[in-house]
Structures are given as structure tokens and as C-alpha cells.
Amino acid sequence: MMNKIRQLLEKRWAAYTFALCSAVILYLFLTHITPLLTWISSLLKLLSPVVIGLVLAYLLDPAVKFLEEKLFRRVKKEATRRALSVVLAVLCLLLLLTLLFSMLIPNLIGSITSLVGNANTYLAKAEELLAKLSASDLGSMLALENIADKLEEFLTQIFSLVTDNLRSIITSVGAVGGALLNWVIGFILSLYFLLGKKGLVNGLDQLRRAALSPENYERRTRFWKRCNQIFVQFIGCNLLDALIVGVSNALFMSIMQMPYTPLVSVLVAVFNLLPTFGPMIGAAAGAVILLFHQPFQALWFLLFTVVLQTLDGYVLKPRLFSSSFGIPAVWTLLAIIVFGKLFGIVGVLLSIPVAAVIAMLYKESFLPWLSRRRGQKQ
């Protein structure tokens, strides 16, 4: 069949016809890409609870499997053993989140309230600093005379913008409520996915066995197992690394008696989840918060952050990520940029494991295919 198609394409009229049809299809695709993207976006928004449920089930499955094999291994009935493991894993997660929020939220609210309540004091300090700079030679060089007025004008414009767009803000709050509802539905669906995992996996396995040859089935099964190992390793190690960095930052700020310790430590831990640029953003956010309270504390915070991130990058992460993903630094940076542009914050978070999977496909599938093709031509 392939030889007949190749012989047909060797004829000039067939090649021209194929090229013309390809150009028409490409033109139609490009002219209708906006409605297509809108339709895909609407479909993804509609299916977002299902996607959230699948992701939550995927993240909880290792804990469920551990409980099933270790704690409830003596329970003879498989369905009962699975149900007990799912219930206990979910209860442990809810208990952990409750304890975490009960410790964090009051401190966070106190930090944010104090930060907002002292906004006028910080503004006065900023104006005083700008006045001193304006009176110095440096101020004349940088033309800082009108910065205080511009800053006050900027804050006034922000206040006016908030009041003028109150309806849009209320709409945004409603969107946040819709997102929370999607997460609640997704959480409920994740329970069904976890309880029915065996049936779902068996059905998918039967479909793959029917569609693939035994050799392709075994090869692709090994591939998916390796992908799962990469993602589980990356997510687990990344969360543990962020927890260690956040706790270390909180201990340092508590010893130095710095304000806003819970708020800054949470920011540092969350931004540490983002590869490459995340720690820098967290350090900058924490330094800005501390700067208005006491500049020297912001300086000590930055110095500690440099030391902490150096130890994290050269000591902690190599030990946590015991097996390297095998991605060059340039490709890692490109993956972060590309996936961040395409999928936002989720793309940035998953850029490294996805790039690792692509690198694995390139080395183990694409390069051998090229070698076989070259051998066939020779």
C-alpha cells in the first residue's frame, strides 16, 4: 500500500494536487483557528471538574496504594481494602489541611492586616526617604523631586480604579466562587476515580491490548510507567523541598524577630515550587514587605535567602532528586518559558517533568527510528 502511494506521489500532477490540498487545509485551519481555540477553551472549562478530579486522584493514589499494601494488607476483600485506604487517605489529607490552615490563616490575616494598617506609615517613610534623596546629589542626578507626588497620584488612581470597576471586581469574586465549586466537584469525583481505579485501569488496558500488537503494548506500558515515575518523583520531591525551604525561612525570621514571618515564609515556600525564577520572585516579594518596616532586616533577609537558595540548589535538590532528569539547562529554561506561555502557572510547574518525558521520547524513540530508517535506505 505504501509503495503504491509513494509511486503515485512521484507523478508530477499527484504531487501538485497533494500540495494544493495541503495549502487549502492549512488556510482553512488558520482562518478558523480563533473559533476552534474558543471551542477548545469552552470544552476545557466544562471539563475542568473532571480534570481536577483526575489530578487529585493521581496525587492521592500513592498514599492510597501505600495504605492498601501496608496497613490494610490483611483485609481479604479487595474492594473493602481499597475503600478503607481511600477513606483514611482522604481523612489524613483533610486533617493535615485543617491543621495547616488553622495555624497559618490567623497569622496570615494578622500579617496582612498589620501590613495594610501601616500603609500610611510606610508611605510616609518612603516620602521621607525620597525627600532625603532629592536633597542629595544623587537625587539631582536621578530627578527624584516629583516622585513622591507621582506616587501619591498613582495610589489615588488605583483607589479610583477600584471604585470605578467595582462591578468587575464582584464578577471576579463570583468567578473565584465558581472555581471553588469546580474544586469541590473535582474532589468528589476524585473519590469515585480512586474507588473505581481497578475498573478504569482494566478497561483502558483491554482497549490498549485490542488496539496494539503485543510488542507495542509492552513497549508503551514501560513508557507510561516511566512517565508516572518521573511525575511522582518530581511532585513529591518538589513539595518536600518547598516545605523545607519555607520552614527554614520561618525559623530564621523568628530568630531574627522579623515581622510578617508567616506571610513571607508562605510566599517563599509557594514561589519555591516554580523552577528557576520562583525563588527570585519569592525573595523580592519578602524583601519589599520587610523594606518599609526596617531596611536592614530586608538586607539580612536577602543575604539569608541567597545562602538558603545556594544550599537548596547545590545540596538539597541533588539529594532529593536522586536520579537526574537528564535535561540540559538551556532546554529546561526553554521548557519553562514555552509551557508557561501556553498553560500559565500549571505549565511552569509541570515544565520540567514534561520536558524530561519529551527528552526520553527523543532519545529512546525518535533517534532509534531515524537509525532504522537510515538502515532501510542503505
Image (spheres, helix red, strand yellow):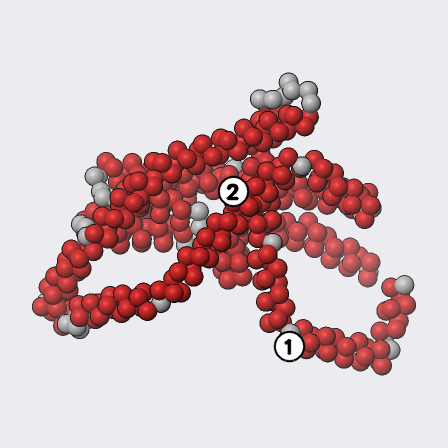
Mark number for residue 211? none
Horizontal arrangement in the rendering, residue 106 relative to residue 8 (left or right): left
Nearest the eye: 245 or 196: 196
Which residue appears farthest toward the top when viewing the image?
74
Give the residue number, with chain letter if any, for mark 1: 31
Task: Tell me the amino acid under the disc marked 2.
Answer: Ile
Work out whether 308 lies above or below 40.
above
Quadrant in which the C terminus appears: bottom right
In which quarter of the view is residue 84 placed? top right
**Where does residue 219 sit, x and y in percent of width and height?**
74, 44
Horizontal arrangement in the rendering, residue 57 relative to residue 377 (left or right): left
**Where does residue 16 sit, x and y in percent of width and height?**
80, 80
Q: Given contact means CB atoms under 8 Å apart, are the residues at marks 1 and 2 in contact?
A: no
Q: Identify which residue is drawn at 86% across, 69% down.
A: 6
Q: Identify which residue is drawn at 80% across, 57% down.
A: 375
Do we see residue 20 in this rendering? yes
**Where does residue 73 sit, x and y in percent of width and height?**
63, 21
Nearer the observer: mark 1 or 2; the answer is 1
What element does badge 1 sit on?
helix
Give the residue number, with chain letter if any, for mark 2: 235
Horizontal arrangement in the rendering, residue 145 relative to residue 110 (left or right): left
Nearest the eye: 153 or 214: 153
Circle 1 residues within 10 Å: few <14, some 14–19, many ≥20:
few
Nearest the eye: 246 or 328: 246
What element does badge 2 sit on?
helix
Nearest the eye: 64 or 229: 64
Q: Earlier in the sequence, mark 1 or mark 2?
A: 1
- CA–CA distance in space, label 1 to label 2: 39 Å
Horizontal arrangement in the rendering, residue 280 relative to residue 56 (left or right): left
Task: Tell me the amino acid under the disc marked 1.
Answer: Thr
